[in-house]
Image: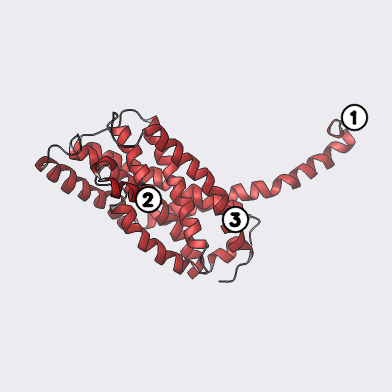
Amino acid sequence: MNPASDPALAGPVRAAEAREDAPARAGLAFAFALVARNLAVERRSLGALFVRLVLQPAIYLFVFGYVVGRMLPGAGGGHYAAVMAPGVIAIAVMNSPYTVVASSILTGFYFRTLEAWLLTPATPRAILLALVASGTLHGLAGAAIVAVLVWAILGLAPDGILLPLVIVAAGSAFFSLLAVIGLLAPKTPRRGQEVFAFLMMPMTFFGCTFYSWDMLEPPFRAFALLLPTTYLSEGLRAAYTPGPGGLPALWVTLGLVAATALLLPVAERVAARRMRDFTW
């Protein structure tokens, strides 16, 4: 006999099920609350947000894409503006998730708000997923803003929406997870911040953002393949200018999705270890 069909047992069964589902509901509520908190923080700093998401990429696109692109009409088999514009989107996909994830973790470190998070019913996994969700949403928003700037300044648009959407979503989640690992794995997030400051430069300028992978000589191609921004830039470049040359779009997309999936358990392990043995 099914206990739930017995009127005398239906109430206790529902109560037991509710108790079992309580941690999941609490974690989901915490995730939504943290995402809303990060959006509220961004709204209070509209000036910095405008500089990071609009002004800086607009300068890159105008100077390198419009001015330099008109001086160099052909580069790597196509117009230079079409080569560098996807790279600027890739930079936004890298920077936006890191900024919001780092803001949450560093605020938790310096102002002890992470201790308050750990006192809630939310599990370390829920905190991790909330951080990744915030970073991914900000990455998607940043990429969308830069894509509009690319269209407004250079008149370029992707050949379809599905491929760039998948690449940007996977790239945003990847860099969100990478930020979590980089900031929580060291003894303190301050050390992780120093490491990221060192890595941002090569990922920005050596990750095939302002040039395509096939423009490089063979020795430098191997180095570029070590940087995640290379795959992100080449995937978006294939979405804007499909055709031969560069890295295959299918393999780049599958690689980004696979790398993100592989990074998730690593980030979960790092977050669980740090938040279980909280010694900051």
On screen, residue 35 above or below 5: below
Q: Residue at x 42, y 44 (%)?
A: 171
Label 2 belongs to which residue?
A: 227
Where in the figure is residue 146, as x and y percent of width and height? 29, 43
**The quadrant where residue 279 appears:** bottom right
Q: Residue at x 46, y 51 (%)?
A: 176
Say few, some or many: other residues with alpha carbon within 10 Å of mark 2 (under 14 / 14 to 19 / 20 or more).
Answer: some
Q: Residue furthest front?
A: 219
On screen, residue 200 above or below 261: below
Say few, some or many: other residues with alpha carbon within 10 Å of mark 1 (under 14 / 14 to 19 / 20 or more).
Answer: few
The type of residue carrying mark 3 is Arg
Name the mark nearer the viewer: 2 or 1. 2
**The quadrant where residue 165 appears:** top left
Question: SS of the residue at dot 2?
Answer: loop
State whether residue 208 appears in this view: no
Q: Is residue 143 left or right of residue 68?
A: right
Q: CA distance from mark 2 to mark 1?
A: 59 Å
The type of residue carrying mark 1 is Met
**Viewer-side residue, 185 vs 50:** 185
Q: Which mark is residue 59?
A: none
The type of residue carrying mark 2 is Leu
Label 3 belongs to which residue?
A: 269
Q: CA distance from mark 2 to mark 3?
A: 23 Å
Q: CA distance from mark 3 to mark 1?
A: 42 Å
Label 1 belongs to which residue?
A: 1
